[in-house]
Image: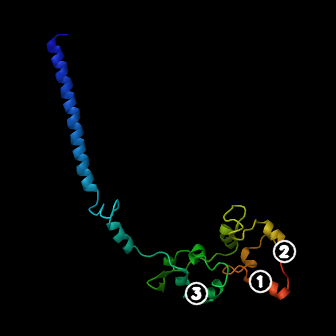
Amino acid sequence: MDSREGEINMSNYALRLIAVATTLVVATGIGFVVKAQLIPDSFGKYGHYRANAIDEEVQRPIRHGTNTSCLKCHTYEAAIHLKGRHNTISCEFCHGTYADHVSNGKKSGTLPVKKNTEISTLCLRCHNTEIKARSQAVIKTVAMPQHLESQEVKLTHTCNQCHHVHAPLKYINRAKQITGLTEAES
């Protein structure tokens, strides 16, 4: 290979390097321009966040209420619920979202009320030993249908035939009072 051929190869190599470097510089520049266009102005004001997101969340309508929100209108249920074992459970857990029932302080819709086997399905979300939803130490759990068999009732019974849904021991305790029966010590 003569020196002229070597110079041509070196010059081609240099041109390729310059082309690659130019491409990288242009791509980086385009990347910065696109990034500047896509990142909101408020990004980074409070760290690695979009500051306007706070205002947007404040403007979002409230969907969930507290038990107090529900019980101020549902006074009959309040009297039972607050004395029962379910007094710490949110009304929304069983009945649905507050915003689907109340809007601007007025009733705007009717929340579904569970009936028949739906009630047992709802109760067993927490009280089912078989799916290990909660440990027995935390919450009373039962295995179905064994629980019904041990109580000597029909296997078609639903939870609310023996238990009040807002205060599960209300009916049980009343029956014990009337009959004078007590549970056997374990």
Q: Are marks 2 and 1 in contact (CB under 8 Å)?
A: no
Marked residue nearer the N-terminal end (2 or 3): 3
Marked residue nearer the N-terminal end (2 or 1): 1
Amino acid on which the number 3 mark rests in the picture: His
Left or right of residue 166, residue 5 in this image: left
* Image spot of residue 102 (x, y percent): 49, 82
Give the image quarter of residue 115: bottom right
Amino acid on which the number 2 mark rests in the picture: Glu
Nearer mark to the viewer, of 2 and 1: 2
* Image spot of residue 77 (x, y percent): 62, 86
Left or right of residue 126, residue 108 in this image: left
- Residue at the spot of label 1: 173
Marked residue nearer the N-terminal end (1 or 3): 3
Q: Which structural element holds mark 1?
A: helix
Image position of 145 with respect to 113: above or below: above
- Residue at the spot of label 2: 185
Amino acid on which the number 1 mark rests in the picture: Asn
Q: Which structural element holds mark 2?
A: loop
- Residue at the spot of label 3: 74
Image position of 42 with respect to 96: above or below: above
Tell me, what colour scheme is on the image? rainbow
Nearer mark to the viewer, of 1 and 3: 1
- Give the distance between the C-alpha atoms of the residues marked 1 and 3, in whole angstroms: 24 Å
Image position of 18 with respect to 59: above or below: above
* Image spot of residue 150 (x, y percent): 83, 70
